[in-house]
Amino acid sequence: MLCRRLRMMRFVLASCAYVLAGAALWPLPAAAETSYYGQKAVQEITSRIAQKDCTGAVGDLKPALKKGFPEVALLAGSMYENGICVARDWEHAVPFYIQ
């Protein structure tokens, strides 16, 4: 009787661990997509900067920031800190770095 209870408890604990491990993985695809699209946006913006197309770079930057990509926020902070295509302004850079 005791062995049966122990086996049943082991089964229940293993099942819970399996479910919890699966639940922990659920947000990964969304996070991976965000990272992919954020990196893609950064590539497009830096490409425009390299072509000296500041109007296009800032135009691409604004909607990407609204989507909340952390990579884009880091790029925006760097752009404000170094004065790339925008006026150099540390106080504007800090909130982007905080994001």
Image (cartoon, helix red, strand yellow):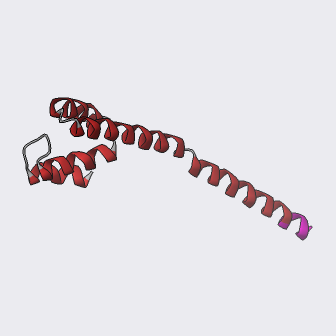
Q: Quadrant of the N terminus?
A: bottom right
- Prevalent SS, magenta region: helix
Stretch in magenta: 1-6
Residue located farthest toward the bottom when viewing the structure as drawn: 2
Q: Position of residue 80 (x, y in %)?
A: 14, 48
Q: Position of residue 93 (x, y in %)?
A: 15, 51
Q: How many marks?
A: 0
Q: From what the image shows, is residue 10 above or below residue 23?
A: below
Q: Quadrant of residue 66?
A: top left
Q: Position of residue 74 (x, y in %)?
A: 27, 50
65 sits left or right of 53 in the view = right
Magenta run includes residue 5? yes
Give the residue displayed 79% in from the left and 62% down from the top. Answer: 9
67 or 85: nearer the viewer: 85
Magenta run includes residue 44? no
Q: Quadrant of residue 90?
A: bottom left
